[in-house]
Image (tube, helix red, strand yellow):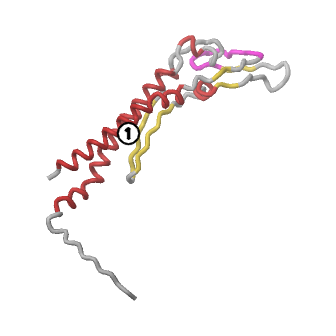
Amino acid sequence: MPRISIDVDLRGLSREIERLDLFPFVLDEEGRKAMADVVEIVRVHVRDRTPIGEAISEFTGGLGSTGHLHTSIKGESHFAYNEMSGRVYTNVPYAHFVEEGHGEILPHKPGGLLYFRPKGMTHKVFARRVRPVAGVHMFRQGLWASRREISERFAAAMKRVASKMGSLP
């Protein structure tokens, strides 16, 4: 069987090779910073598009808004085992109705009533029907509005990585 052997002389390249050993650490550091920045950018865009006051009253049966949904928009970044992720979210139960809207809601039994107890109120609210409502899409639109800034943050992070790698001893 024919055999080919190639020898490479790496003398004089030891500093460049040492730099490559540091590359994952520099990349992780800049990636973490960029992801945290991006999550905050998206969170602000989503929050700015979240209805408040009378704009949300159609989702709450005409009760107006306490600003709870608006202030509940949170963001978090995770870093583990060379993987990073970020998410923007809310834990408000009616948020998906505001985001996606809903069709007409009727009682289970003909002639019946719908009822719910709004947070912070002692009495129930009754209705024969809840009319359809179009979604606001604050999460979708917030992400869409953030695209350019997301690209810019990660591009700047990669430039900082390249700069740091070039300036290492």
Quarter-wise, where is residue 104 in the image? top right
Report if residue 1 lies within the magenta region: no
- Vertical comparison of 27 with 7: above or below: above
Q: Residue at x 64, y 25 (%)?
A: 101
Residue on which the image places disc 1: 35
Q: Residue at x 41, y 50 (%)?
A: 83
Q: Is residue 70 left or right of residue 60?
A: left
What is the x, y in percent for residue 45? 45, 25
- Vertical comparison of 107 with 18: above or below: above
Q: Secondary structure at mark 1?
A: helix
Q: Residue at x 84, y 18 (%)?
A: 111
What is the x, y in percent for residue 3? 35, 84
**Magenta region: which residues?**
117-128
- Mark 1: give few (<14), some (14-19) or many (20+) Cα within 10 Å: many
Which secondary structure class fits the magenta region best? loop
Q: Is residue 12 left or right of residue 122?
A: left
Image quadrant occupied by the N terminus: bottom left
What is the x, y in percent for residue 157? 31, 41
- Vertical comparison of 56 with 167: above or below: above
The tally of labels here is: 1
Q: Is residue 73 left or right of residue 27?
A: right
Residue type at mark 1 is Met
Outermost residue on the right side: it is 110
Q: Residue at x 68, y 16 (%)?
A: 124
Q: Is residue 114 left or right of residue 82?
A: right
Report if residue 125 lies within the magenta region: yes
Q: Nearer the viewer, residue 17 or 119?
A: 17
